[in-house]
């Protein structure tokens, strides 16, 4: 158990180093010269050469990489090529906070809708309710966000005037409702699917039959025995959902005009702002890897039957 | 993400399986069981119909996909003319959608054959059968790739590789005299195919590897080994046929996801390039990369909804088909 966690913790930095190198390599493959981009129409060959030297672009790839890693370990992810003189961390930080809030709100919606509905569908197996829930959730899951977002705005904001259409003022304002719903609906569909499958699995177990045979009330069996055990596999899903902060809400943020990571990361890709991009990928990988590690460990605490190797 | 063991229709269908005459071949039995699931069967038919529309796009088009008609822009549906209306440049929406479907068909097939089927299955076979260092290397590479946020990785790959690949194609055109490599859109397909590669092979590889790890210890494989059967023969004759079922299930779930990724890439202008239509290009153009989504949906819904409904149907139907395949092919997995 401890050995497993240690091994994972040792592998994590290696994983991140490799991921960072990959993005670095992509940066060198990408066409265009950041120095030239930065100078714009003041770009003369001498100026470009001077700036390249200044930015350290003339050093070989592995030198730049080692320098980058050295700085990153001290919490410095470099300066943006495009936003002159701006620290990458200062650029990403506030936007990441926005995306994080949006995704947490979305996950709350997905969980509160998805888990009970999935449980209910499983309990109704064999009736028409079960396939009706499964199929309607699948329809919602397949619904492209290009439609969900404008439709929700048109219906709830423009027509009914219930909530504001766009903009952002934190997680606890009404503005978060529509974008969170847009991300949360397909999320709920995924939770329904998995919750239903895992509830069905638990219902078939013998200890459930024993619990019923002991004369326990249906309510107690449902909530203490079935639901609790069925929730366990859902934990692993949470890891992926948490890590979805980078990229998961890309289009949603664009359509709702939310100042999250999406605009910045897209601009970084198109303007070849590689310091920003590297930081994004690095932070995204870090979150994904750590989230999965935490979830794995949490799993063994919640369910002592599981032993990690 | 969608590969849960779940089914949409359970119970009554399963009991009737036993009544089938036992002399049917395995795949005919599977097909017979699949056909009883009405929703899944209908979904498969819808998917086939959509794909046929794409394949026969040159035949069933009513206009040329890049013909602009500035006298008839943003028109609503009109019977006998542009029956699904026209876009901002007066191009026929129906024609552009069927050509867009063709793009989807080409990209799904090429990505699946190269990424999932070729790379994923062979690497899974090799990693699972030989284990040891080769398995470790393949798994570690996969872990690094899956540590990336996937949409960002796809966009990053497409953005950085496109200019290089376009340049390469132009060089080939210049030196060999072949023309139309860039303008025909082949380059776009290569770019998208490579960008989607990291996403498509690892899941399949892990799935096949898991199966092979169990199968290599099976007695019939041991028997084959003892009889001196060559390794490739064991891999392809004895093990491969037994991993076909999970591969089919995974492919049917994955096709929808691949189609959606292409739409997202083209939406951002990184996938298929105009004038060649694609569902993602259409959605991206009509909503001005997201900004004008609401006004388009209100004022000219047919322009936005036509490509979206196709994407919606594709993802929904493939998921239903995948569910049914899972039930039909892995009856024990439930």
Image (cartoon, rainbow, N blue to C red):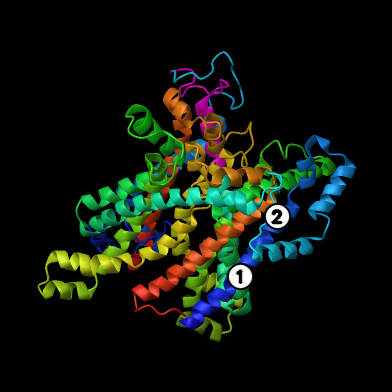
Which quadrant would residue B245 be assigned to in this image?
Answer: bottom left
Residue B127 in the image: state x and y as whole percent: 58, 73
Q: Which residue is mark 2?
A: A26
Residue segment shown in magenta? B79-104
Q: Residues within 10 Å of mark 2 (few under 14, many from 20)?
A: some
Q: Disc 1 to disc 2, how far (Cα)?
A: 20 Å
Residue at image point 58% right, 55% down: B113
The numbered mark at residue A13 is 1
Residue at image point 50% right, 77% down: A5
Residue at image point 58% right, 40% down: B268
Q: Secondary structure at mark 1?
A: helix
Q: Is residue A205 left or right of residue A188?
A: left
Rendered view: B89 above or below B231: above
Q: Residues within 10 Å of mark 1 (few under 14, many from 20)?
A: few
Pinpoint the chain carrying mark 1. Answer: A
Q: Is residue B100 magenta?
A: yes
Query: B51 or A173: nearer the eye?
Result: A173
Rendered view: B121 above or below B56: below
Residue at image point 20% right, 72% down: A208
Residue A108 in the image: state x and y as whole percent: 36, 53
Of badges 1 and 2, the one in the foreground is 1
Residue B251 in the image: state x and y as whole percent: 48, 56
First in sequence: mark 1 vs mark 2 = 1
Residue B37 at least partly seen: no
């Amino acid at each position: 158990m401890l050995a497993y966690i240690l091994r994972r913790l040792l592998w994590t930095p290696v994983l991140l180093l490799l991921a960072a190198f990959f993005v670095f390599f992509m940066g060198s493959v990408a066409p265009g010269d950041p120095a030239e981009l930065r100078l714009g129409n003041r770009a003369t060959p001498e100026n470009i050469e001077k700036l390249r030297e200044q930015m350290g672009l003339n050093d070989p790839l592995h030198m730049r990489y080692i320098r980058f890693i050295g700085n990153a370990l001290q919490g410095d992810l470099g300066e943006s090529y495009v936003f002159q003189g701006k620290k990458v961390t200062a650029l990403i930080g506030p936007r990441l906070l926005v995306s994080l809030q949006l995704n947490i709100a979305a996950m709350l919606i997905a969980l509160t809708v998805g888990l009970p509905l999935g449980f209910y569908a499983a309990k109704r197996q064999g009736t028409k309710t079960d396939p009706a829930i499964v199929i309607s959730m699948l329809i919602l899951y397949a619904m492209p966000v290009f439609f969900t977002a404008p439709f929700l705005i048109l219906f709830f904001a423009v027509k009914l005037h219930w909530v504001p259409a766009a903009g952002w003022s934190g997680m606890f304002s009404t503005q978060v409702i529509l974008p969170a719903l847009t991300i949360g609906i397909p999320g709920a569909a995924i939770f329904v699917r998995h919750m239903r499958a895992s509830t069905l699995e638990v219902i078939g177990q013998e200890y459930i039959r024993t619990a019923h045979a002991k004369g326990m009330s249906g309510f107690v069996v449902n909530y203490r025995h079935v639901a609790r055990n069925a929730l366990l596999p859902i934990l692993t899903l949470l890891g992926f959902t948490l890590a979805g902060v980078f990229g998961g809400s890309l289009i949603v943020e664009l359509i709702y005009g939310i100042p999250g990571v999406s605009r910045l990361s897209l601009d970084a890709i198109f303007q070849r702002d590689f310091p920003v991009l590297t930081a994004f990928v690095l932070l995204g990988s870090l979150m994904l890897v750590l989230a999965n590690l935490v979830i794995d460990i949490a799993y063994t605490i919640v369910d002592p039957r599981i032993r990690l190797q | 993400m969608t590969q849960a063991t779940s089914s949409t229709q359970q119970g009554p269908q399963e009991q009737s399986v036993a009544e089938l005459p036992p002399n049917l071949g395995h795949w005919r039995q599977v097909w017979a069981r699949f056909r009883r699931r009405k929703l899944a069967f209908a979904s498969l038919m819808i998917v086939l119909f959509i794909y046929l529309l794409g394949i026969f796009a040159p035949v069933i088009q009513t206009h040329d996909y890049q013909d602009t008609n500035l006298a008839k822009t943003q028109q609503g549906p009109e019977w006998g003319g542009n029956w699904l209306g026209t876009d901002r440049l007066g191009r026929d929406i129906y024609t552009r959608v069927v050509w867009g479907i063709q793009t989807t068909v080409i990209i799904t097939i090429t990505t699946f054959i190269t990424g999932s089927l070729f790379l994923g299955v062979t690497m899974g076979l090799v990693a699972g059968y030989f284990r040891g260092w080769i398995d470790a290397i393949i798994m570690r590479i996969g872990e690094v790739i899956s540590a990336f946020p996937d949409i960002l990785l796809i966009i990053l790959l497409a953005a950085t590789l496109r200019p290089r690949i376009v340049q390469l194609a132009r060089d080939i055109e210049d030196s060999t005299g072949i023309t139309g490599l860039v303008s025909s859109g082949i380059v776009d397909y290569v770019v998208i195919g490579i960008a989607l590669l990291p996403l498509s092979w690892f899941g399949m590889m892990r799935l096949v590897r898991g199966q092979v790890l169990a199968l290599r210890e099976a007695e019939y494989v041991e028997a084959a080994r003892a009889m001196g059967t060559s390794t490739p023969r064991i891999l392809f004759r004895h093990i491969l046929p037994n991993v076909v079922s999970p591969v089919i299930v995974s492919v049917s779930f994955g096709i929808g996801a691949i189609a959606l990724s292409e739409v997202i890439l083209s939406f951002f202008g990184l996938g298929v390039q105009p004038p060649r239509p694609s569902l993602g290009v259409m959605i991206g153009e009509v909503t001005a990369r997201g900004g004008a989504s609401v006004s388009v949906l209100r004022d000219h819904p047919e322009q936005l909804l036509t490509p979206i409904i196709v994407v919606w149907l594709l993802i929904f139907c493939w998921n239903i088909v995948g569910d049914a395949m899972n039930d039909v092919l892995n009856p024990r997995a439930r």
